[in-house]
Image (tube, helix red, strand yellow):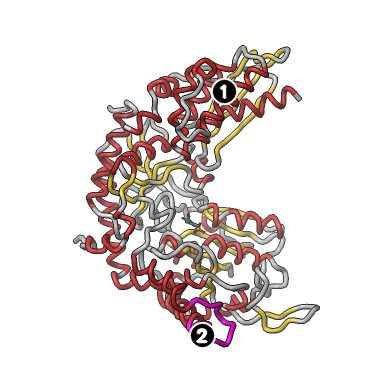
């Protein structure tokens, strides 16, 4: 049964504008960044209008109110992912979160750290943000990077998991949902294998947290990251969640004001987590904006959101299968699959596909989607990708499908 | 339609049957360039004698704009002196930076003027310049 979320689109002011060709906007690029509802835009600007002050310093009323709002945002995020308040660190993005974890784990002064000869395991379908920080960590420490591969239809290949995740493995960094294939990975199964050998698990929840309900305890991971801007929230705010006892064992990666317990000319000691990971005046208005986004999402219900996207994915996959020359890159079935659909159009480069679709007001992502090794393995230059959020509807899919027919006729590849 | 100003028939023709595509076995230099934002790649072989461009051949994967542009570039530059080639290159770069305000010098750029519309699509300018930048790099290395 499909869920009717059509009433929510009007909350997103961007859909009032016209785009190329005088067309209304069909926004199918939420995998890159989502659009923002009025409530988020207002929460962010109201922070500036009414309570703007640097949090955690200053003895005045504004500083008090700003700090309260900022900490309430932290609690809201914690609740959203099933965590404790003091386990949620605000960063500027998922990318920053992953780099902070990698730097902290690469510091020999951290009670838990990566050493020469340790194995770090990733997957071959990672976004560059969950690949390069680990490549660099391996380089700095002398650790060895290895990876789980994927099957032809874009599922994780666990057939050799026992050879990849071994007693040498100290860290497993994986994506929850592929930003290219749309595949949802069996995190519990992978974390079970990691835990069995005592390895830590870092989960990239960029493509999952904004779309379906997640719980860090159920997932059985040690760290989790996502970006506010893909979850209807503002840019410039990211989440780093870590188990409290682990956060306490790690050295910070960014140093400065607001993160110290005590400072002398010779050195400094750190406040406890999460504050020690938040040096400097943080992105306060953005944290408050993200909190409004979480309220917005949870008010609709994450289960409703995922059912809605599931229906759209089903409709798009069915529609694409009826167009000759179009190949879906990723699973064709709906099992463990989110609202991200990559495809190629035979004889037309993704960039050209995207350009023609843009002429009809349809915004898609084209290229390698920051997953270059994945593309190399598939011997593709890139794909065209449609990804959803709550403001999409069946009409958007119809416009995309007819747009693809126009691409084919424009480039004369109709057959 | 706006799109037709981007995808001129000349461009689509060069895309479907690109000229000088397929690398020759011999050359003075080979360069490889890519466009990290979209993954397009070009490998270019250049042969020069007495300051003159004797041959250009190239291969690569890319969108219609980048393939057609590499095709037009090699047509235009083979047989030219290094200095002439640079004048043409500069004219093409300026056309790409014209934000739709220039129609291009047809005497100098021949089929290259078909790319004038590309300058209105900021995301595509890099595509159109990929082959040209590979040539620029290769020629500079040979002239060193
Ligand atoms: C799976 C995945 N991981 C990480 C990122 C990086 O997120 P950000 O650029 O917001 O830091 C993205 C965003 O494109 C993503 O899709």
Residue A142: horizontal and vertical position, in percent?
71, 57
Secondary structure at badge 1 equals strand
Q: Which residue is mark 1?
A: B58
Q: Residue at x 62, y 15 (%)?
A: B55
Q: Is residue A184 left or right of residue A256?
A: left
For the residue with label 1, is its CB less than 8 Å from the closest atom of ligand 1? no
Quick check: A385 above or below A351? below
Indicate yes or no whether the magenta region holds residue A64: yes
B99 and A133: which is toward the camera: B99
Quick check: A371 above or below A359? below
Residue B25: horizontal and vertical position, in percent?
63, 17
A151 and A94: which is toward the camera: A94
Q: Which residues are magenta?
A: A52-65
Secondary structure at badge 2 equals helix
Q: Which residue is mark 2?
A: A64
B134 and A126: which is toward the camera: B134
């Amino acid at each position: 049964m499909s869920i009717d979320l059509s009433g929510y689109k009007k909350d997103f002011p961007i859909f009032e504008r016209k785009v190329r060709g005088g067309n209304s906007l069909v926004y199918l690029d939420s995998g890159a960044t989502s659009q923002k509802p009025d409530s988020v835009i207002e929460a962010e600007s109201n922070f500036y209008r009414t309570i703007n002050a640097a949090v955690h310093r200053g003895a005045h009323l504004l500083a008090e109110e700003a700090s309260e709002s900022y900490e309430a945002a932290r609690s809201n995020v914690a609740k959203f992912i099933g965590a404790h308040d003091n386990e949620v660190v605000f960063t500027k993005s998922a990318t920053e979160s992953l780099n902070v974890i990698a730097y902290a784990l690469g510091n020999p002064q951290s009670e838990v750290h990566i050493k020469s000869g340790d194995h770090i395991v990733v997957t071959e379908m990672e976004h560059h943000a969950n690949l390069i920080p680990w490549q660099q960590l391996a380089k700095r420490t002398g650790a060895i990077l290895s990876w789980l591969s994927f099957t032809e239809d874009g599922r994780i290949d666990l057939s050799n998991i026992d050879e990849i995740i071994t007693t040498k493995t100290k860290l497993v960094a994986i994506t929850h949902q592929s930003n290219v294939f749309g595949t949802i990975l069996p995190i519990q199964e992978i974390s079970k294998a990691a835990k069995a050998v005592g390895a830590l698990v870092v989960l990239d929840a960029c493509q999952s947290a904004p779309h379906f309900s997640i719980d860090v305890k159920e997932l059985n991971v040690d760290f989790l990251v996502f970006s506010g801007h893909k979850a209807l929230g503002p840019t410039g705010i990211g989440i780093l969640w870590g188990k409290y006892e682990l956060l306490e064992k790690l050295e910070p990666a960014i140093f400065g004001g607001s993160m110290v317990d005590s400072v002398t000319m010779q050195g400094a000691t750190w406040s406890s987590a999460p504050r020690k990971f938040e040096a400097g005046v943080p992105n306060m208005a953005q944290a408050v904006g993200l909190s409004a986004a979480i309220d917005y999402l949870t008010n609709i219900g994450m289960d409703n959101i995922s059912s809605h996207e599931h229906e759209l994915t089903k409709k798009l996959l069915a529609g694409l299968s009826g167009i000759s020359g179009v190949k879906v890159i990723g699973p064709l079935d709906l099992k463990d699959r989110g609202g991200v659909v990559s495809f190629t159009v035979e004889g037309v480069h993704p960039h050209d596909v995207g350009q023609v679709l843009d002429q009809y007001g349809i915004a898609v992502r084209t290229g390698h989607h920051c997953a270059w090794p994945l593309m190399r393995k598939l011997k593709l230059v890139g794909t065209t990708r449609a990804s959803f959020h709550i403001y999409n509807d069946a009409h958007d899919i119809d416009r995309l499908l007819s747009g693809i027919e126009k691409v084919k006729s424009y480039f004369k590849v109709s057959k | 339609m706006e799109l037709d100003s981007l995808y001129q028939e000349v461009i689509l023709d060069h895309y479907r049957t690109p000229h000088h595509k397929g690398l020759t076995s011999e050359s003075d230099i080979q360069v490889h360039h890519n466009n990290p934002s979209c993954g397009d790649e070009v490998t270019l072989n250049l042969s020069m004698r007495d300051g003159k461009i004797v041959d250009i051949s190239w291969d690569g994967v890319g969108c219609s704009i980048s393939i057609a542009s590499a095709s037009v570039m090699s047509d235009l530059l083979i047989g030219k002196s290094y200095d002439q080639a640079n004048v043409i290159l500069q004219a093409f770069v300026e056309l790409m930076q014209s934000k739709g305000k220039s129609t291009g010098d047809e005497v100098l750029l021949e089929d290259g003027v078909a790319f004038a519309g590309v300058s209105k699509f900021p995301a595509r300018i890099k595509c159109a310049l990929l082959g040209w930048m590979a040539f620029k790099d290769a020629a500079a290395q040979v002239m060193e």
